[in-house]
Amino acid sequence: MQYTDVAIVGGGLAGSTVAAMLGRAGIPAVVIDPHPVYPPELRCEKIGGEQLDLLRKTGLAEPTLRATSLDGEVWEARFGYVVAKRPSDQHGIMYDTLVNTVRAQIPPGVKIVVAKAVAVRSSDERQKIELSNGEEISARLVVLANGLNIGLRHTLGIQRRIVSRCHSITLGFDVAPTGAAFAFPALTYWPKRASARMAYLTLFPIGDKMRANLMVYREMTDPWFQQFKRAPEETMCAMMPGLARMTGGFRVVGPVKIRPADLCVTDGHLQPGIVLIGDAFATSCPAAGTGATKVFTDAGRLCNVYIPAWLSTNGMDTAKISQFYDDPEKVDCEARCLAKAYHLRALSTEFGLSWRARRWGRFIIRAIQGMRHLIWRPAPQRVANPTGQPQHGNLA
Ligand SMILES: Cc1cc2nc3c(=O)[nH]c(=O)nc-3n(C[C@H](O)[C@H](O)[C@H](O)COP(=O)(O)OP(=O)(O)OC[C@H]3O[C@@H](n4cnc5c(N)ncnc54)[C@H](O)[C@@H]3O)c2cc1C
C-alpha cells in the first residue's frame, strides 16, 4: 500500500495540470495513468483567448506555450468573402504534445504510476484505490480526471447523463497548398447557410504544417463522411463556396480523423474524498472550443484555492468537496461553456428568420470592423510572444 495526500486518476490535460501544480506546491501526490506517454488523439489542437490567462494561473504557461505555434493573425471569412484580417493569439499544438509538455513539468516528487485504477472506495477520512497491477494506494483525496472513461465512476454510483447526443463532430486533418504557400497565417471560414450543417472551418499552423479542424453538425451515419473521405477537397469546396479563392489550390494530406462529441453532465458526484474535474465532470463542445477553458479553470481553482485548505484540516467530507463544485468561477465557467455550445449549434443550423438575421448581422459587423481595421491598421508587427522565445508559427 502506498500512502499519499492526493491521488490523481488520469494523466490527460486535467490530471497532468493538477499533478504539476501540486508537485510545485510541495503537496504529496501520485498520478495514475495507463499510458507512460500520452498517445496521439484528435482533441483540443489550439488554445487562445481567455484560456491563456487561465493557463498562466496554473504557473505552467511558459514551457507549454513554447511548444505551440502562434498564428499571430487570422483571416476571417464569412459568406464566401474574407471580411477581416485581425490579430490573433491562437496557439496551435497537437493534443498529445500539449499533454506531454504539461506532464514534463510534473516535478520528480510526484510519482507517476503506469496502471489503470480499477476500483475506488471512499470515506470521510482516507480513500483506497485498487490498481490494475495489483497495487493499492491510500490517499486523503482522489482527483478523478479520467475523462470519458465511465467504468470507474459507475463503481462509485456516479452516473454520466448525455444532455445532447452527438452534439457536434470534428474532422481533423492537415492541408497543404498545391502551388505557392497559403497567403494567410490562419483562416476561419464561417458558412452562409444553415444547410451546410457546419459551424466553421479553422486552418492554423502547427510547426511547419497547416492543420484543419472542420466542425459539423450531422449524424455519424451520414454518407457525407464517406464522401468527405473519398474526395475531401471537392467536398470542402462544394460546402464552402469561395474557399478555393482564399486558399488557392490545396490538398488534404495524411489521415482524416473524425470524432463525435456528446455533451455530458454527471449525477451523484458529490461524495466524500473524491472530486471530479475536466471531462470526467462534464464534457464540452469541440466547436465551442471550451474544453481547455474548463480544464484550466478546474485545475486553477482546485490547486490554488481548495486542496491546500482542505489538507490543512482533518477529514475530507462532502462539506469540503462541495466548496469546489459550488465555486462561483467554476459554476460560471460550466454555464458559459454549455450555453456557448447550444448557441453555436443554433446559430449554425437553425433556418428561422431570427437566426438568419443573426448570421447576417455577424457578417455585416465583421465586414465593417474589417474595413475599419484595414483603414486604421498600424504597421505590421510581430505579435508579442509571452515566452520571449521564438515561435514556430507563420507570422507573415
Ligand atoms: C474532437 C475534439 C476536439 C476538441 N477541440 C477542442 C478545442 O479546440 N478547444 C478546447 O478547448 N477543447 C477542445 N476539446 C475538448 C478537450 O480536448 C477536452 O475537454 C480535454 O482534453 C479534457 O481533458 P481531460 O484531462 O479531462 O481528459 P483526457 O485528456 O481524456 O484524460 C483522461 C485521462 O484519463 C486516463 N484514464 C482513463 N481511465 C483511467 C483509469 N481507469 N485509470 C487511470 N487513468 C485513466 C486516460 O488514459 C487519459 O490520460 C475537444 C475535444 C474533442 C473530442
Image (cartoon, grey):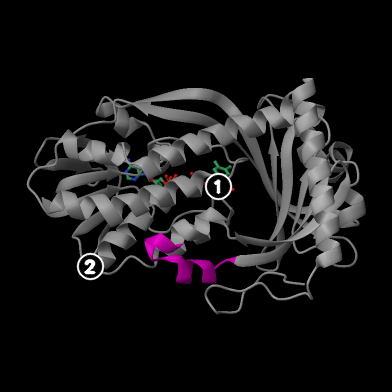
Where residue 21 sits in the image (x, y, percent)?
31, 61
Q: Is residue 153 visible?
A: yes
- The quadrant in which the C terminus is found is bottom right
**Earlier sequence position, callout 2 versus callout 1:** 1
Is the CB atom of the residue marked by disc 2 within 8 angstroms of ligand 1's nearest atom?
no
Is the CB atom of the residue marked by disc 1 within 8 angstroms of ligand 1's nearest atom?
yes
For the residue marked with disc 2, what is the amino acid? Gly
For the residue marked with disc 1, what is the amino acid? Arg
Residue plotted at (70% across, 68% down) = 208
- Position of 304 with respect to 124 (left or right) is right
Q: Are marks 2 and 1 in contact (CB under 8 Å)?
A: no
Question: In the rendered image of this protein, does residue 267 appear above or below residue 119?
Answer: above
Specify the segment rendered in magenta.
56-68
Where residue 299 sits in the image (x, y, percent)?
36, 52
Where residue 186 sits in the image (x, y, percent)?
74, 59
Q: Quick check: is 337 in the magenta stretch?
A: no
Structural crowding at the residue carrying mark 2, measured as other residues with C-alpha within 10 Å and reported as few (<14), some (14–19) or many (≥20): some
Q: Which of the labelled discs sits on residue 43, or is there none? A: 1
Question: In the rendered image of this protein, does residue 357 appear above or below residue 170?
Answer: above
SS label for mark 2? loop
- Position of 86 with respect to 289 (left or right) is right
- Position of 87 with respect to 38 (left or right) is right
Residue plotted at (65% across, 34% down) = 344
Residue plotted at (21% across, 36% down) = 120
Cα–Cα span, label 2 and label 1: 29 Å
Given residues 328 and 118, the one toward you in this image is 328
Q: On the image, which quarter does residue 274 sit in?
A: top left
Given residues 200 and 331, the one toward you in this image is 331
Q: Most prominent secondary structure in the magenta stretch?
A: helix
Q: Which of the labelled discs sits on residue 109, or is there none? A: 2
Where residue 116 sits in the image (x, y, percent)?
30, 44
Residue plotted at (45% across, 65% down) = 101
